[in-house]
Amino acid sequence: MKKSIKILLWISIPAVLAIAFIVPRTGIFGTKGKEKPQGSVPAAAQQPKQGGQGTANVLQVKGIIAKPSYLTDGIRSAGTLLANEEVDIVSKVSGKVTGVYFQEGSSVKEGQLLVKIYDEDLQAQLQRSQIQEKLLAEKLERQRILLSKDAVSRESFDQLQTDYNVIVADINLLKVKIAETEIRAPFDGVIGFRYVSEGSFVQPSVKIAHLIDHSVIKLEFAIPEKYVGLPLMEKKVSFMTEGFNEPFIAYVYAIDYRVDEQTRTIGLRARYANTDRRLVPGMFASVTLITDEKDNAIQVPTEAVVPSMNEKYVWLAKRGKAIYTQVEAGNRTDWSLEIKAGVSAGDTVIVNGLMQLRPNMPVDVTLTE
């Protein structure tokens, strides 16, 4: 009896487990009328309906209007600004400073007294010589009258004439020495810091001050020797310096035709009328020696140009769509590229979002300066 029960259990337990696993998956007990789960919706039913051509997204971009502008082409270089005239003010004689008659950083005129050196000993010698000259002049006049009457010898008269000429020469020499104790401005300009004080002793090598005339600025720069054959005299030069956003225009007035053996360049100097005294000597300048000028060049920002192999393209906005256009490039500046062909004045050039654009893609352009 026990053995038959064990056999029944071994048969019934697997059968129950099989029924419990199969029945829920067959839907035998009334799952036919229930709604299907959301995940069983056909994929075709989830696609949005499209009528006609559909509605595409409009890309927001920025652009500029192409306009004719002034453009120059030339030889680029670096230069230095020089003063029209400049000199270190020094004394020609040794002595004690008795007066300083200028203010640092002030404008001075040609011939203006700047510094006075002690000269009382020279003044005393001059006064003595002038008295001697007066006496000799009177004596010489009397001797001339006597000579006309043969009352004195010619030799005696010539000796007196020589003594008179010597004293006159001494007077002139003393006046020159006294003038050297007066240090005056050699030209109109602006004087810098002073390096002596009243009461100090100066030597001929001692620098008193520095005087510059920068009413006219000289621009010194160099260009490669291969351009030596160009007509360089009176050429226009555009240059820029730190602190100023606008370019300055100078004109070549001197050429050093000797080629530098180390740099293989020739030196040039241009002149700029610095009437407002804005530029000062010693400044660095970025120089362009202008060889070509255009008044109606079309320029676009460099970031608007798409390079492709040996060609260049830009995106134009026409009738609300992006047009991929091949262009012919010209001269390049720091921020722009000249377009010789492919873009006309009045065209709208797209300047951003270029990687997202596709031909004929609808675009909404916001114009910028």
Image: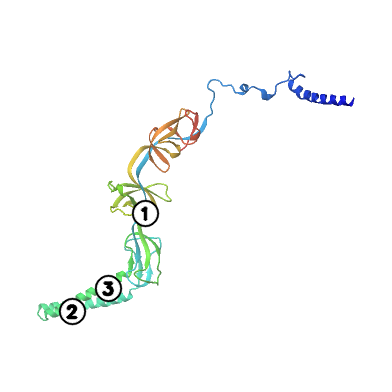
Q: Place residue 177 in its image quadrant.
A: bottom left
Q: Residue furthest left?
A: 150
In the rendered image, the vertical position of residue 291 relative to residue 258, given as above or below: above
> What residue is pinned by disc 3?
174
The secondary element bearing badge 2 is classed as helix
Query: If the image is split into quadrants, where does the N terminus sit?
Result: top right
Q: CA distance from mark 3 to mark 1?
A: 42 Å
> What residue is pinned by disc 2?
139
> 267 or 261, which lies in front?
261
Residue 24: x %, y % from top left: 76, 23
Q: Identify which residue is drawn at 14% across, 78% down.
A: 157
> What residue is pinned by disc 1?
81
Number of residues whose C-alpha sits closer than 10 Å to that of mark 3, classed few (under 14), some (14–19) or many (20 or more): some
Amino acid type of the residue that numbered disc 2 sits on in the rendered structure = Lys
Sequence-earlier tag: 1 or 2: 1
Residue 5: x %, y % from top left: 87, 25
The secondary element bearing badge 1 is classed as strand
Work out whether residue 146 can be spotted. Answer: no
Sequence-earlier tag: 2 or 3: 2
Sequence-earlier tag: 3 or 1: 1
Tell me, yes or no, whether the two marked residues, 3 and 1, touch with CB atoms within 8 Å: no
> 247 or 287, which lies in front?
287
Number of residues whose C-alpha sits closer than 10 Å to that of mark 1, classed few (under 14), some (14–19) or many (20 or more): many
Residue 147: x %, y % from top left: 11, 78
Tell me, yes or no, whether the two marked residues, 1 and 2, touch with CB atoms within 8 Å: no
